[in-house]
Structures are given as structure tokens and as C-alpha cells.
Image (cartoon, rainbow, N blue to C red):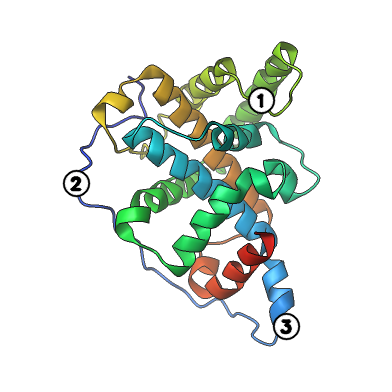
Amino acid sequence: MGAIIYLHNDDSSEPGVDSEQRNFGERRSQPQNQRISGFRDHVLALAGLVQATSLINSASRSGLVSQDTLENSINSVFIQNPGSTLDVFGGVTGVRKGLLILRELLTNFDVAQHGRILQYALAIMGLERKLTTRPAIMRQLGAEIANIDEQRMLRQSDDRLIDASSVRQLSTLYESLISEIQPQIQINGNRQHLQDRTNIERIRALLLAGLRACVLWRQVGGNKWQLAFNRRAMTGAIEQLL
């Protein structure tokens, strides 16, 4: 079993949510429609993150994930020079599940339903911040992903199809470059599913998808205080996209 997986029973209590907040001087005079549209890229990136962590949660607990949603999330790892934020996910359809989950997180958060999803998202955000201080790893990660993508395209004609070999290679990449960075991300779930090699490979590949979304979120100007002080505008942006 790989280094990132730590076994915990599902009967343990769900994680709490860090309630730390800070007022960063929101400009209240900005027109509402303009404010909502200004968060479009932010919510797309966050939706990509929670879509990945939702799939991780499902894979670790039941061993079952939607194949289409899985492919949409993992494919985002290979989109390194997008023309727009939407291009990373192949359009709204590719991140629709994440948008629906993000809307629930912003408007109707429930610890039992959303606790693990949020826990993994916050952990991946922390990991991405650490990686920004290690540019050599980031460069190597980008180069290796490009190499995996090139091999993938030699095997198939559909550039959005994710085969088992690509998932395996992404899993190996995560394990070799990222999994030892402390603190390691802790995955909770069913022991049987966390000992299944195919499932572990999917989880590691999805962790890379979550990292990709975090990088995107930072690139479009996202910060954690928006989640505390701009929930209404972000929810409005989600509604426009859906």
C-alpha cells in the first residue's frame, strides 16, 4: 500500500472546519452583477478542487466513482496552457458535479455529508502552498506530466479519454514526488478499498487533479478569505454557470 494512504474507520467523528476569518476590505460599492461575474473563474477552480475531493471520498469509502466525472477531473491535470479557466475542465459539463457540491458547501454545509470533502480540499490547499516554495519539484512535476500526456496521446486518438495506464503513471508520479511532503494527506475510508491497488491509483491521480485546481485558483486570484466574506457573490457565479 502506498505512502499516502492511512487507514481510519468511518465510524470516527467527522472533521471540523477551521473558522478563522479576516476582513480584507471588500469594495461594497461594486455593482452586484459585476461582483458575481468577477468570481466566475474562482468558483470554477474551487469546483474543480471539490469535485476531485468528492471523488476521493467516494473512492475511499465505497470504491465507486462516476467514470465520466473521474475522467473530467484527471484530464484537467494535462491541461497546462488553457485559453480560459473553463478550458481546463472541457467546459461547464466537465466540472458540473463540483459546482453543485461547491454550492452546497457555501449555502447548506453539513458536516456529515461534506466534512471529508472539505477536509481533503483544505489539505490539498496546504500542500499546494508548500509546493510553491519548491520550484524544482514544480518544474519536474510539470515535465513528467507532459511526458505522461505525450505517451497517452500516442496510445489513443481521444484527447479527453483517460486510460488505466495514465492513471497508474500519475499515481506513481504523485508517490515519487509529492507523497513524502509533510504533513502527508490522510485519506479515510473502508480498509478494503484503501488496500485495492486500482483504487489507490485513482485516489493519487485525483490528488494531482486537486493540486491542479489549487494552482488554477491561485492563478486567477483566489484566496481563502473569499470563502468567508464573498459567499453570496460566489453562489451567484455558480448559479450563472449552471
Coordinates of residue 40 in the picture (x, y in percent)? 68, 62
User: Does 2 sit left or right of 98 as displayed?
Assistant: left
Residue at the spot 71% in from the left edge and 68% down from the top edge: 38
Report whether residue 130 is seen: yes
Disc 1 element: loop
Report whether residue 221 is seen: no
Residue located beneath label 2 in the image: 12
The type of residue carrying mark 2 is Ser
The type of residue carrying mark 1 is Leu
Residue extending farthest to the bottom is 29
- On residue 23, the disc is none
Q: Residues within 10 Å of mark 2 (few under 14, many from 20)?
A: few
Residue at the spot 63% in from the left edge and 34% down from the top edge: 77
Q: CA distance from mark 2 to mark 3?
A: 45 Å
User: Does 37 sit left or right of 59 as displayed?
Assistant: right
Depth order, front residue of 36/185: 36
Residue located beneath label 3 in the image: 31
Q: CA distance from mark 1 to mark 3?
A: 41 Å
Residue located beneath label 1 in the image: 161
Mark earlier in primary sequence (1, 3): 3
Q: Residues within 10 Å of mark 1 (few under 14, many from 20)?
A: some
Q: What number of labels is visible?
A: 3
The type of residue carrying mark 3 is Pro
Displayed quadrant of residue 159: top right
Mark earlier in primary sequence (2, 3): 2
User: Does 142 sit left or right of 51 as displayed?
Assistant: right
Coordinates of residue 95 in the picture (x, y in percent)? 61, 47
Coordinates of residue 55 in the picture (x, y in percent)? 46, 39
Disc 2 element: loop
